[in-house]
Image (tube, rainbow, N blue to C red):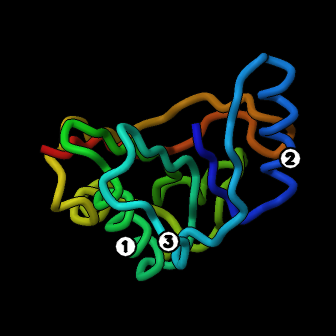
Amino acid sequence: MTLVDISPVGLEKAERLARERGCRIETIAADLTIWDWPLGQFDLVVEIFVHVPIAERQVIHRAMAACLRPGGLALVEAFQKGQTAQSSGGPRTAPLLYDAPALAADFTDLCTLELLEGTVLLAEGSKHRGPAQVVRYLGLRT
């Protein structure tokens, strides 16, 4: 398993948790917008709560699609625009938040298997607790 994150602190936490659970991971500290994504190499790519400006988001999503092998899946979960009314975390500026049509449009090279918007209950530390408005995408490389 390969983890890529811009935050060395986040990667250190992931490494610690992996060791505690007896898992092996590779971590790479990188900005996803300029990382040299390995084309056609992954069976699954996952993006969880990555909130960047729209142009950067589209670069990341195109790269995610391109790095999948045939039969590979892309999974994204992000806060949607309604999240600004919630106190469970996430950006407070609309351009950094997602909506389902825009998210699906980012992955035109994939077959959309699921595209969901709704409320989930977060319990991920003190800053991400309570109801949250999210969008989820699952796409398949054919």
| Mark closest to the chain's N terminus, 2 or 3 | 2
| Mark 1 nearby-residue class (10 Å; few <14, some 14–19, many ≥20) | some
Task: Assign the C terminus to one quadrant of the image.
Answer: top left
Left or right of 35, for residue 7: right
Report x, y in % for residue 87. Answer: 72, 48
Measured in 3D between alpha carbons, the distance from the residue under mark 1 to the one under mark 3, in whole angstroms, is 15 Å
Q: Amino acid at mark 3?
A: Asp
Who is closer to the viewer here, 119 or 3? 3
Q: Residue furthest bottom?
A: 55
Q: Which mark is residue 58?
A: 1
Q: Nearer the viewer, mark 2 or mark 3?
A: 3
Residue 70, image quadrant: top left
Q: Residue 39 lies in what quarter of the image?
A: bottom left
Task: Say which residue label 2 marks.
Answer: 12
Residue depicted at 55% across the width and 47% down the height? 48
Judge left or right: residue 90 versus residue 39. Answer: right
Label 2 amino acid?
Glu
Identify which amino acid the numbered label 1 is placed on: Gln
Q: Which residue is mark 3?
A: 36
Residue 126, located in which quarter of the rendered image?
Answer: top right
Q: Are marks 1 and 2 in contact (CB under 8 Å)?
A: no
Nearest-to-viewer mark from 1 and 3: 3
Q: Earlier in the sequence, mark 1 or mark 2?
A: 2
